[in-house]
Amino acid sequence: MKRCATWLLAMALLLTGGVPFSVAEQIQLRQDAGGVTTLGGVDDAAKVSQAGMLACERLQDQASKGHCVIVDAANLSVISKTTAATIGGGVANDTYLKRIIVLAALTGTCVVTGFADSDGAAQSFTIPATFVGERNFGGAKNSAGALTVTCSNASDDNLVLVEWWPAS
């Protein structure tokens, strides 16, 4: 019923040439509790303009202007030993792990440390033998100690790549 009344009022105003508001009138917002909040009039002071382009905007007719390039940068460490290879600075919360890439099937396993289990305690995880491919960690921070990678077999040297970024 309320919608119908609103529609009828709007049609009556349009047909009679009446306009329900003008730019000089006050704008009011109805509140849930039944009250009204007055916002003020709308005039030239309410107009906003932007003279230049904002970051990463691009002109439709000039693609070379205002173009924003996003680079997925990372440091890369090649694991080339069977002892723990420290990635980053060597303390908790200093490194983001982006991705681990294994170029060919592993002969042994690789253990990664520096992350916490569901209770917050330090917990390692193992990349299994015969694995090949990549695992994306999306920038996980080493919250439970130094980020290290230890591969167990010398024949796996130079097959494991770690993409990372310093957290500080």
Image (cartoon, grey):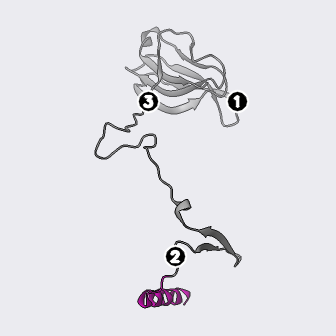
| Vertical arrangement, residue 30 with respect to residue 130, above or below | below
Residue drawn at x 34%, y 38% as measured from the top left: 65
- Residue sitting farthest toward the left: 61
In the image, is 96 to the left or to the right of 116? left
Residue drawn at x 55%, y 21% as measured from the top left: 111
Q: Is mark 1 on a helix, strand or loop?
A: loop
| Rendered location of residue 125, percent (x, y) | 57, 27
Which of discs 3 and 2 lies nearer the camera? The answer is: 2
Q: Are marks 2 and 1 in contact (CB under 8 Å)?
A: no
- Binning the other alpha carbons within 10 Å of mark 1 as few (below 14), some (14 to 19) or many (20 upward) gives few
In the image, is 3 to the left or to the right of 26? left
Q: What element carries label 3?
A: loop
Residue 9 magenta: yes
Residue 121 is labelled as 1
| Rendered location of residue 27, percent (x, y) | 59, 72
Q: What stretch is highlighted in magenta?
A: 1-19
Q: Name the residue under label 2.
A: 22
Q: Label the magenta part by its dominant secondary structure.
A: helix
| Rendered location of residue 1, percent (x, y) | 54, 90
- Front residue of 95/83: it is 95
- Front residue of 49/144: it is 49
What's under tag 2, amino acid-wise?
Answer: Ser
Which of discs 2 and 1 lies nearer the camera? The answer is: 2
Q: Name the residue under label 3.
A: 72
